[in-house]
Amino acid sequence: MSKRLKLPPDKILTTIQTARDLALTPAPSVNYCDNDCLDTLLNAAMELQGLMPWSSNYTFLANLAGPDEQVVMGIYKPGDGERPLWDFPNRSLSQREFASYLVSQVLGWPNIPTTVLRNGPHGFGTVQLFVEADYDAHFFTMREVPLYIEEFKRMALFDYVTNNADRKGGHCLKGTDGTVWAIDHGLTFHSDLKLRTVIWDFCDQPIAEPLMDDLDNFHTLLDNGQLCAVLADFITARELEALKKRVSTLVTSRQFPTARLGRNVPYPPI
């Protein structure tokens, strides 16, 4: 995987549409960003408003003005602003974040704000639709609310599928309409198991049939190569093989994974 990967907007748009076409049911997050919104994220001029606080890497709030002058707010993470990591080399976090979004579109869950790869004022990186949220809310304030339990189950499975090494409580946002959103998926798809998450509430529980249907479809798409063709530009062949093994484990066991020994919670947890 090259850190200099730069795909044109039409290729990114085609990739997103292909991922959505593979889903059994559309991801609910599609309703929050129509085709005009997606076109704006991909192509509109970007005006940076400033750096987002408490981010490990350079992360900017940006305004993007569409052709009808309607402004869309986005979160811009340039690849060249990524902090070097020994276990995630080549400044590939933006590609992994985009790959995670594609997986969410194929599975139909969890809710991830629409995410694209594109060029910007500080180079190529991700732009993600900005979500208005209650920033006092996070996983630990929502985990026992019955309304959100099913969403957190989906998020827990997604994190295992993508091998998310950094699911902090603060990466679970509560939108102003009550929708739970999952953000920050740069530390994903490593070929070694690195799952670190605060969501271990469902260990060894059986996976409900509707979720198993989505996982079975996902497994089939990996086996027949359709999904590998979608993801191959963004993660390595070795990482794709590890993804296949993780999904196969879920399909065989039909239950949530067991918490592994060692470090399995990110720091800080929020």
Image (spheres, rainbow, N blue to C red):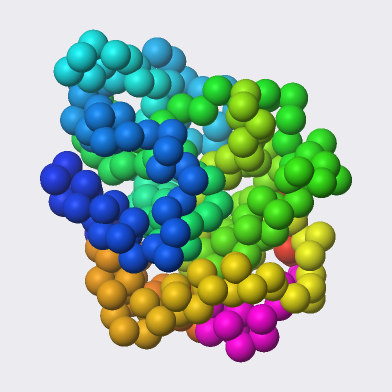
Q: Does 188 sit above or below residue 167?
A: below
The residue stretch that appears in magenta: 246-262
| Quarter of image, res 23 | bottom left
Kindly identify the residue that appears in the image at 22 percent across and 49 percent down: 12
Q: Nearer the viewer, residue 112 or 194?
A: 112
Q: Is residue 78 visible?
A: no
Q: Nearer the viewer, residue 154 or 213?
A: 213
Q: Does 95 sit above or below residue 184?
A: below
Q: Nearer the viewer, residue 116 or 221?
A: 221
Can you give x and y, in whole percent of width and height, for residue 249 in the image?
59, 84
In the rendered view of the protein, which quadrant contains the N terminus?
Answer: bottom left
Kindly identify the residue that appears in the image at 26 percent across and 36 percent down: 35
In the rendered view of the protein, which quadrant contains the C terminus?
Answer: top right
Kindly identify the residue that appears in the image at 74 percent across and 30 percent down: 137
Residue 84 colored in magenta in the image: no
* Lateral position of residue 261 relative to residue 39, left or right: right
Residue 256 colored in magenta in the image: yes
Outermost residue, right direction? 144
Can you give x and y, in whole percent of width and height, for residue 49 in the image?
40, 13
